[in-house]
Structure formats: C-alpha cells, structure tokens
Amino acid sequence: MKICDKGLAIIKKYEGFYNRPYLCPALIYTIGYGHVLYPEQARLPLAERKAYSLKAEHNRVWSKEEINDLLVKDIARFERGVTMLFPVSYQFTQGMFSALCSFAFNGGVGLLQRSSVRSALLRGDKAMAGESLLKYNRGGGKVLNGLVKRRQDEYNLLMT
C-alpha cells in the first residue's frame, strides 16, 4: 500500500519546505520536508542535541530536486516501516495507512511501534487508536500547537 495524496499533503503542510538545514523543535538538524540529516543526533539525549555540529557540506541551499528526491525516499521508507509493524493479513483502510505513515514520518517508526495507537489497532479498536493519536502532541518536551493540529488532521484521515 502507498500513502494517499491527503496523507502526503499532511506531511508537506506540517513539515514545511526548507531548502536550508535548521534545528527542528526536537533539536535535530532537518532539511526539506522534515528529512532528518543525522539520525544519530536523534538518538542523543535532548540536552546534547544542540551541541551536534552541522557538517559543512550540508550547510548550503538545497535544490527543489534534491529535496523532492529525499521526500520520495523517506516516504518509501515509512511506508515499509508501517507495513512491517502489522501482520501481513492486517486490513488497512487507505486513510488509516496514510495517517500512520504521516505519524511515523513525524515521530519515527520506533515511536509507532511502541505507541498506544498501534496497540489499539492491533486489538481492533480504531476509536481508541484515534484517541491515542491525539495525545502525541509534544516536541522537545512541550505541547506544540502545530502537532496538535497535525494530529487532528491525522485523526480525521485515520477515521475515514
């Protein structure tokens, strides 16, 4: 299964387009539509992330083509990740799969794996999965208005 246009639109809307690297609210260097430049930085404790150095070759203006290539590769990786976390026989709706891809794109496949969202879906409780999804609204230890809105859009897509 592939992410639908609505799911891709959620990712683009909330990740935003950046052609220069920046530190996201979770203090991770990011480019394009939420592409993490250094996955190892994300594994550091929050207090140590800001000290991580941006490499000279990444400190530049990136082309739209480079950023779109990153997005295509990232989306494919998260589609595979979501698929692997559920039994082969699991019956996703298109909205459910796309919402989970957006959620994983934002928080990581590991977060989805250990989330109450996934647990509820595996139990067949879509309503509880939706309620749980809305609770994942923090970045850098703080409730972020953008995440509150994103989770609501993901919730709406999940429930379709």
Image: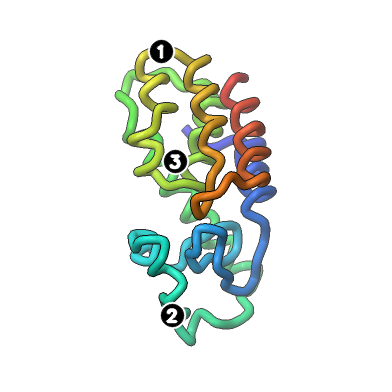
Label 3 crowding class (10 Å Cα cut-off): few <14, some 14-19, many 20+?
many
Label 1 crowding class (10 Å Cα cut-off): few <14, some 14-19, many 20+?
few
Q: Position of residue 140 (x, y in %)?
A: 50, 54
- Measure how far apart labels 3 and 1 are at the Cα level: 20 Å
Instruction: Decide which of tag 1 and tag 2 comes sooner along the chain.
Output: 2
As drawn, the label of residue 53 is: 2
Of residue 50 and residue 79, the one placed in the foreground of this image is 50
| Contact between labelled residues 2 and 1, with CB atoms less than 8 Å apart | no
| Contact between labelled residues 1 and 3, with CB atoms less than 8 Å apart | no
Q: Residue at x 48, y 87 (%)?
A: 56
As drawn, the label of residue 124 is: 1
- Measure how far apart labels 1 and 2 are at the Cα level: 44 Å
Is residue 122 depicted above or below 35 in this figure?
A: above
Q: Position of residue 109 (x, y in %)?
A: 38, 43
- Indicate the secondary structure of the residue bearing disc 3: helix
Foreground: disc 3 or disc 1: 1
Residue type beneath disc 3: Glu
Is residue 60 depicted above or below 67 in this figure?
A: below
